[in-house]
Amino acid sequence: MRINSFISIALTAALTASCMAMDHDPAMDSNIQEPLIIGNVTDDSGNAIEHIKVTLNWNDGAFTETKYTNSDGVFLAEIWEAEEETVRSLTVTLEDIDGEENGGLFESCTETFTVFEEHSTAELDFRLNRATASESIPQSW
């Protein structure tokens, strides 16, 4: 009786362990690639700029999201996929929101792209110019 109980417990543990292993395989995660935008933001000398506000505006406002660059000057975003097949335009606006912190004051930049491939990764590189003093001072007319 005691041997049957031990075999039963061992068999249950083996089945549970094998089901758990089949339930989630981390190696499979690396094979699934989400359509992704990788943005690199640097100054004119190639230095990464942290904490730049990045606004992604798809198809003139159909979907908008905000990201921020990390300490490597990188932002990540998934490529927006419309329910119906349409040409997807992406307007990226970069804004320095922290003033002189994180490398100085930089000019804003806006670029518009057309995304053709649905299931690929797009890498975008941006170089921001330093803002001049007159651009930093609000003008009154």
Image (spheres, rainbow, N blue to C red):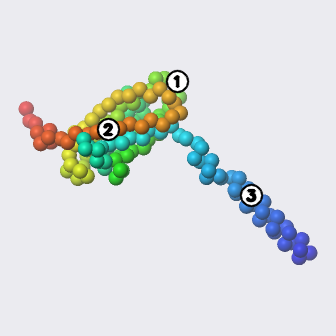
Residue 109, position in %: x, y? 27, 35
Name the residue carrying label 1. 85
**Residue 66 visible from this viewpoint:** no
Residue 22, position in %: x, y? 71, 53
Counting residues from the N terminus, which is met first, the one under dot 2 or under dot 3?
3
Counting residues from the N terminus, which is met first, the one under dot 3 or under dot 1?
3
Q: Locate residue 15 relative to residue 131 in the image: left or right.
A: right
Name the residue carrying label 3. 18
Residue 84, position in %: x, y? 53, 25
Rendered residue at 55%/41% (across/down)? 33
Q: Which mark is residue 126?
A: 2
What type is the residue that disc 2 sits on? Phe
User: In what element is the residue under mark 2?
Assistant: strand
Counting residues from the N terminus, which is met first, the one under dot 2 or under dot 1?
1
What type is the residue that disc 3 sits on? Ser
Quarter that holds the C terminus: top left
Rendered residue at 69%/56% (across/down)? 21
**Residue 90 visible from this viewpoint:** yes
Tell me which corner region of the image, top left, top right, bottom left or bottom right, holds residue 7.
bottom right
Quarter that holds the N terminus: bottom right
User: In what element is the residue under mark 3?
Assistant: helix
List the single residue furthest toward the left.
Answer: 141
Rendered residue at 51%/37% (across/down)? 35
Residue in the foreground of this view, choosing between 48 and 106: 48
